[in-house]
Amino acid sequence: MTQAEKANLFKSLHVKGDPLTLYNIWDAGGAKALAEAGAKSVATGSWSVAAAQGFADGEAIPLPFLLQIVERIAASVDIPLSVDFEGGYSVEPEGLMENIRKLIRAGAIGINFEDRVVQGEGLYPVAKQVERIKAIRAAANRANVPLFINARTDVFLKADASEHEARTPDAIERGAAYAEAGADGFFVPGLAQKTLIEQIVGASSLPVNVMMRGDLKSVSDVAKTGISRASFGPAPYANAMTDLVERFKKLT
């Protein structure tokens, strides 16, 4: 498949109520293992990719190194690859456009793109994040690849669950603005209350993505809310490292 065909296939896999399940990987070996197990696409998790190379999350892994990893993963499997690109390694649109061109050349057909100020405080104002998403879409259009932009909001991620209901209108507003700016999906990590997920699904014109954590135990169960994508974030890496340590301890 061409890169554009992979991007179109990836977009088609987002079906409301029948979500695309992405068990996030961090290297080419993991991508190959999942592809051989029948995965229709693969996606990295930024925390996992960084941790696997000894870095902290939050764009601490140098961009050239990250691009090398992406290139190896993309070259190792013939299925779509989405990359958790955090904040795009740039605040301003000009830098974002250049970084997206590099990421597409490395083989990515989709990204997670968050509204958290990476290595800063809080979230970008909606207008600023809209400007950034528009820049990404423009760069993808120039590369002639229909890059799947999964617009992530961190409205819920570090907030206590008791605050999530009050934060839902802000999330819905952000989702609508990001959709108008050219996003293809809306990611709400940290939100695990199914009634609130249903509210966001009902209000969003975009396929909604949740992270499987907390009360979200079963993909088939959360699919009833109408989500179109379920991902696992850093959990696969954490589980793999726990298994590694436990097996090592049993050697003696």
Image (tube, rainbow, N blue to C red):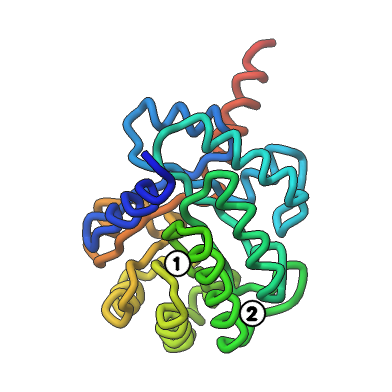
Q: In the picture provided, is 56 more to the left or to the right than 80?
A: right
* Residue to which mark 2 is pinned: 123
Residue 197 in the image: state x and y as whole percent. Answer: 34, 72
* Amino acid type of the residue tagged 2 in the rendering: Leu
Is 230 placed left or right of 87 in the picture?
left
Q: Which residue sits at x=65%, y=63%? A: 88
Question: Could you tell me which residue is drawn at 45 percent across and 57 percent down?
Answer: 145
Q: Say which of 44 and 65 sits in front.
A: 65
- Image quadrant where residue 123 sits: bottom right
Determine whether the residue tagged by mark 2 lies in a helix, strand or loop.
Answer: loop
**What's the CA distance linking mark 2 and mark 1?**
15 Å
- Is 205 situated left or right of 185 in this image? left
Q: Residue at x 35, y 36 (%)?
A: 39
**Label at residue 187:** 1
State which quarter of the image contains the C terminus: top right
Res 159 quadrant in image: bottom right
Number of marks: 2
Graded by Cα atoms within 10 Å as few (under 14), some (14 to 19) or many (20 or more), the crowding at tag 2 reads some
Residue that appears at 58% across and 74% down: 135
Label pair 2/1, CB-CB below 8 angstroms: no
Residue 186 falls left or right of residue 71: left
| Residue 159 visible within the image | no
Residue 193 to residue 107: above or below: below
Image quarter (top left, top right, bottom left or bottom right) of the N terminus: top left
Looking at the image, tell me whether mark 2 or mark 1 is earlier in sequence order: 2
Q: Give the amino acid at mark 1.
A: Phe
In front here: 107 or 123? 107
- Picture layout, residue 43 above or below residue 167: above
Tell me the number on the disc at residue 248.
Answer: none
